[in-house]
C-alpha cells in the first residue's frame, strides 16, 4: 500500500474557525499544494482535506525531509508527520507497525518504544488503550530487539485509527501556526535592512496577510550593497510568503529639501512622515490597504508614543505595528528563528542614518511639524517619489 510518501498535516488555529473552517482548510490545502508544486514541477502530488486534517501524498522518489521542511513553513500548519497507512483492522495495523519499527531500528538503532493510540472512528470496536496494548504486543513479537519503555521511550509510536484507513507515525514536526496566506488582506510593508521590519512583515504574513514592500534608499549616500541586502532579506521572506513585489524609492531629494528648509532636530520625524505618505500612495496604486512597519514603542526617538502619533497623522491608512510591545531581545530571537537575523546585522548604512540629527525631538508636536512642512511642496515631493519607484519581483531563494 505504501508506494507513496504520506504526510499528515494538522491545521492549528484553522481548526477553530467554526462555520468558516472549510474555507480556511481549502486555502491551507491550496497553499501547501502551491508550495510543493513549485519545488516538484510536474510530478504527481495529492493534497486532500479529510476529517479536519490535510493529507499529502507524493511519489516515493520525493525527498521526504524536504517536504516536511517546506510544508512546515506554510502559514496555518500546526505540525506535520510523515506517516504510513494501513487498512483499519488490528492485524493490518500491527503488520504496518512492525515494518515501521523495523525500519527505525535499522535507521536509528531504536531500542525502546511505546504505542499511543487514538480512535477518530468511535465505531471501531476496540478502545484506544486496548488498541495501544494490542499493537504494542504485535510490535514486541515482530521486533525482537525492542522493549517497551512507558516513561522515556526512544520512539513514541502513534496509531491513528480512522474509518477505512489508519495511520502510523512517530515524528511531529512543528509548523509556525497562524493562518493561510491570502485570508487576511493586503499590506504594504515599509522595509529597511534592519532587524525589525522583516520580522514585522513575517508576523503579518503569518496572520494571513498578503504583503508587498517598499524600501527607501539615499543613493549615492547609501550603497548598492545596502540595496542588495534588502533584496536578500526579501528573498528570505519570500520563502514563507511566496513571490512578492519590492518597490524601491530614492528618498534623497526629499531629505535634501527637509535638511535645507526645516529645523534639524525634526529631520527624522519629517522623513518618517514622508515615508508613510509615499508608502500609502504606493499601496493605493497596488491594491494594499494597510501599512506595516517594524516600529517598536520607545526603541528610538522616532518611536516614542508622541512620535508615533505624529507619524500616523501623516496618513489615513491604518498602520500595523506587530512589534509594538515586544522587547528587542525577543524580536532578535524571532529574526534568528525565521532566518533573517544574519542578513539584517550586516553593517550597511540605511537612509535613516543619512542626515541623522544630533538631538532628534522625542516629543514632537503635530502643529509644529505641520508648520515645518508648510515650507515644503509635500504633495509634489510625494508624487515625484511615487513616480520614481522601481519595482522588482522577489522570488524565494
Ligand atoms: P529596522 O530594524 O526595521 O530597520 P529600526 O529599529 O532601525 O527598524 P527605524 O529605522 O526608526 O527603526 O525604522 C522604523 C521603521 O520604519 C522600520 O521598522 C521600517 O518599517 C521603517 N523604515 C525605516 N527605514 C526604512 C527604509 N529605509 N525603507 C523602508 N522602511 C523603512
Ligand atoms: Mg532601520
Image (cartoon, rainbow, N blue to C red):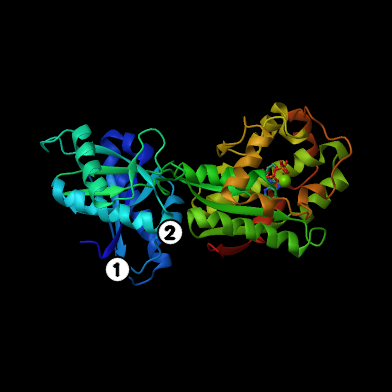
**Image mark for residue 65:** 2
Question: Mark 1 vs mark 2: which is more N-terminal?
Answer: 1
Locate the N terminus by quadrant. Answer: bottom left
**Image mark for residue 83:** none
Q: In which quarter of the image is residue 40?
A: bottom left
x and y, in percent, of residue 59 in the image: 31, 67
Quick check: marks 1 and 2 in contact, CB under 8 Å?
Answer: no
Q: Mark 1 points at which residue?
A: 44
Residue 379 vs residue 115: left or right?
right
- The structure residue drawn at horizontal position 80% and vertical position 50%, both measured from the top left corner, is 255
x and y, in percent, of residue 168 in the image: 27, 48
Residue 323 vs residue 87: left or right?
right
384, 17: nearer the viewer: 17
Whether residue 213 is visible here, answered yes or no, is yes
- The structure residue drawn at horizontal position 27% and vertical position 56%, both measured from the top left corner, is 99
x and y, in percent, of residue 39 in the image: 43, 66
- The structure residue drawn at horizontal position 38% and vertical position 65%, both measured from the top left corner, is 37
How many marks the image carries: the answer is 2
Q: In which quarter of the image is residue 133?
A: top left
366, 191: nearer the viewer: 191
Identify the secondary structure beneath mark 1: loop
The answer to whether mark 1 is within 8 Å of ligand 1 is: no
x and y, in percent, of residue 159 in the image: 26, 43
Amino acid at each position: 500500500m505504501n508506494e507513496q510518501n504520506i504526510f499528515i498535516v494538522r491545521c492549528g488555529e484553522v481548526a477553530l474557525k467554526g462555520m468558516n473552517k472549510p474555507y480556511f482548510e481549502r486555502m491551507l490545502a491550496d497553499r501547501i499544494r502551491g508550495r510543493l508544486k513549485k519545488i516538484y514541477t510536474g510530478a504527481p502530488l495529492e493534497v486532500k482535506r479529510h476529517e479536519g486534517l490535510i493529507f499529502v501524498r507524493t511519489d516515493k522518489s520525493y525527498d521526504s525531509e524536504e517536504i516536511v521542511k517546506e510544508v512546515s513553513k506554510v502559514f496555518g500548519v500546526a505540525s506535520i508527520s510523515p506517516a504510513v497507512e494501513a487498512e483499519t483492522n488490528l492485524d493490518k495495523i500491527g503488520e504496518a507497525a512492525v515494518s515501521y519499527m523495523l525500519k527505525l531500528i535499522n535507521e536509528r538503532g531504536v531500542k525502546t518504544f511505546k504505542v499511543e493510540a487514538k480512535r477518530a472512528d468511535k465505531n471501531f470496536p476496540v478502545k484506544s488503550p486496548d488498541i495501544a496494548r494490542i499493537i504494542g504486543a504485535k510490535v514486541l513479537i515482530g521486533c525482537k530487539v525492542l522493549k517497551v519503555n512507558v516513561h522515556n521511550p526512544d520512539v513514541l509510536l502513534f496509531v491513528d485509527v480512522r474509518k477505512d484507513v489508519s495511520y502510523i507515525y512517530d515524528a511531529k514536526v512543528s509548523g509556525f501556526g497562524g493562518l493561510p496566506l491570502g485570508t487576511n488582506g493586503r499590506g504594504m510593508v515599509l522595509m529597511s535592512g534592519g532587524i525589525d521590519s522583516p520580522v514585522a512583515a513575517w508576523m503579518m504574513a503569518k496572520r494571513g496577510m498578503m504583503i508587498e514592500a517598499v524600501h527607501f534608499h539615499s543613493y549615492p549616500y547609501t550603497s548598492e550593497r545596502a540595496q542588495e541586502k534588502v533584496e536578500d532579506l526579501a528573498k528570505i521572506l519570500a520563502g514563507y510568503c511566496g513571490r512578492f513585489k519590492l518597490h524601491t524609492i530614492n528618498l534623497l531629494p526629499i531629505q535634501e529639501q527637509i535638511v535645507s528648509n526645516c529645523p534639524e532636530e525634526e529631520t527624522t520625524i519629517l522623513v518618517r512622515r514622508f515615508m508613510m505618505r509615499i508608502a500609502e500612495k504606493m499601496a493605493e496604486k497596488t491594491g494594499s490597504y494597510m501599512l506595516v512597519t517594524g516600529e517598536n514603542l520607545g526603541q528610538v526617538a522616532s518611536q516614542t508614543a508622541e512620535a508615533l502619533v505624529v507619524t500616523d497623522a501623516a496618513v489615513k491608512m491604518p498602520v500595523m505595528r506587530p512589534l509594538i510591545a515586544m522587547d528587542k531581545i525577543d524580536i532578535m530571537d524571532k529574526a534568528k528563528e525565521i532566518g533573517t537575523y544574519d542578513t539584517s546585522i550586516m553593517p550597511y548604512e540605511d537612509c535613516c542614518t543619512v542626515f541623522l540629527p544630533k538631538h532628534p525631538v522625542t516629543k514632537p508636536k503635530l502643529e509644529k511639524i505641520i508648520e515645518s512642512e508648510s515650507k515644503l511642496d509635500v504633495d509634489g515631493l510625494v508624487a515625484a517619489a511615487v513616480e520614481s519607484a522601481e519595482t522588482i519581483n522577489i522570488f524565494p531563494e
